[in-house]
């Protein structure tokens, strides 16, 4: 059974959201929201499940959300393109504001 977490939601102690990564990009950047509500992020690293790509994603989110990188965890999908990310100490509203998505 495949779980679907498509919107940014408040979780215990933080926020959780779904990310779809696209690899082999020229720059690491937030593309925006997909139709299903997940965030689309381009990464320079490849492939999507590689530890280097996951590290790049965590670093990008830490910088963009202005939170320490140890507060960000890929809780599902570390080996694929679709990932569920949890960020401690931040609300869904703050994530949306800092990523400028809604």
Image (cartoon, grey):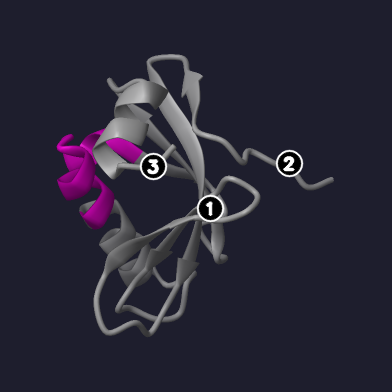
Residue at left 28%, top 65%?
Answer: 29
Q: Position of residue 38 (x, y in %)?
A: 55, 49
Mark with earlier residue (1, 2):
2
* Label 3–label 1 contact, CB within 8 A: no
Q: Residues within 10 Å of mark 2 (few under 14, many from 20)?
A: few
Which of the labelled discs sits on residue 50, or is there none? none
Which element type, helix, strand or loop, lies under badge 1?
Answer: strand
Q: Which residue is mark 1?
A: 83
Q: Residues within 10 Å of mark 3 (few under 14, many from 20)?
A: some
Q: Position of residue 12 (x, y in %)?
A: 46, 14
Which residues lie in the magenta part? 60-72
Which element type, helix, strand or loop, lies under badge 2?
Answer: loop
For the N terminus, which image quadrant? top right
Q: In this view, which residue lies farthest toward the top?
A: 12
Which element type, helix, strand or loop, lies under badge 3?
Answer: loop
Q: Nearer the viewer, residue 86 or 52?
A: 86
Q: CA distance from mark 2 to mark 3?
A: 23 Å
For the C terminus, which image quadrant? top left
Q: Which residue is mark 3?
A: 101
Q: Which residue is mark 2?
A: 3
Q: Residues within 10 Å of mark 1 (few under 14, many from 20)?
A: many
Residue at left 73%, top 41%?
Answer: 3
Q: Nearer the viewer, residue 38 or 46?
A: 38
Residue at left 30%, top 26%?
Answer: 94
Name the front one of labels 2 and 3. 3
Q: Is residue 76 magenta?
A: no
Q: Position of residue 21 (x, y in %)?
A: 47, 65
Residue at left 63%, top 53%?
Answer: 35
Q: Nearer the viewer, residue 68 or 7?
A: 7
């Amino acid at each position: 059974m495949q779980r679907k977490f498509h919107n940014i939601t408040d979780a215990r102690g933080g926020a959780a959201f779904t990310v779809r990564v696209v690899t082999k990009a020229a720059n690491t950047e937030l593309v925006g929201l997909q139709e299903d509500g997940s965030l689309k992020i381009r990464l320079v690293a490849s492939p999507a499940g590689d530890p280097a790509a996951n590290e790049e994603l965590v670093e990008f989110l830490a910088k963009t959300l202005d939170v320490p990188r140890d507060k960000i965890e890929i809780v599902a999908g570390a080996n694929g393109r679709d990932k569920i990310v949890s960020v401690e100490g931040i609300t869904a509203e703050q994530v949306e504001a800092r990523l400028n998505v809604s």
